[in-house]
Amino acid sequence: MKRKLRIKDAKALCGSLGSRSVIVIAFDADGTFESASYGETKAECFQTGKVLDRICDKLTSGEIAENAPVERERKWVCAACGEANCTDYKACQARVAAREGFR
């Protein structure tokens, strides 16, 4: 890593997101990582730090691999009918094209 991750980096990110607390983990090419957390109040800072400690313990033990694939259910909302994961995508796509004047 070019430089150390600092708490003020986490604080800046928290402020830019408008969040109350934030956890930052930066991974290097060799698999090493640095982490920082920030909370607006002492209680939030303490709680966020405890969560970060548990995450780092799992990363260090190998229970969580930083390069492990994450399976997520694909979710999207159909532009034509507004349903999540619409099963009639082609028909809905044609309706959208007709409605907007495209073919």
Image (cartoon, grey):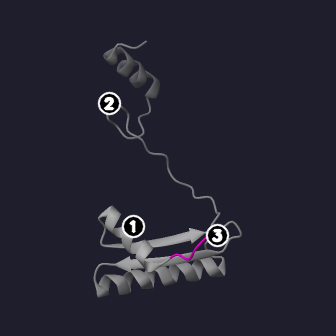
Q: In front of the other: label 2 or label 1?
A: 1
**Furthest residue to the front?**
2
- Which amino acid lies under the numbered mark 2 shown in the image of this protein? Cys
The image quadrant of residue 38 is: bottom left
Task: Check the image and report above or below for 31 versus 99.
Answer: below
Q: Nearer the viewer, residue 94 or 18?
A: 18
Question: In terms of sequence position, does the residue under pointer 1 or pointer 3 come before the other?
Answer: 1
Please tell me the numbered disc located at residue 65: 3
Residue 31 in the image: above or below residue 92: below
Compared across the picture, whether 1 is left or right of 45 comes to right
For disc 2, the neighbor class at 10 Å (few under 14, some 14 to 19, many from 20) is: some
Write the start and end of the magenta stretch as one range: 1-5
| Place of residue 37 in the rendered image (x, y in percent of width and height, measured from the top left) | 43, 78
Q: Name the residue type under label 1.
A: Leu
Q: Amino acid at mark 3?
A: Ala
* C-alpha span from label 2 to label 1: 37 Å
Spot occupied by residue 100 in the image (x, y as percentages of width and height): 33, 17
Question: x, y percentage for residue 24?
Answer: 48, 71
Name the residue carrying label 2: 81
Q: Nearer the viewer, residue 10 or 93?
A: 10
Instruction: Give the residue displayed 43% in from the left and 85% down from the top.
Output: 50
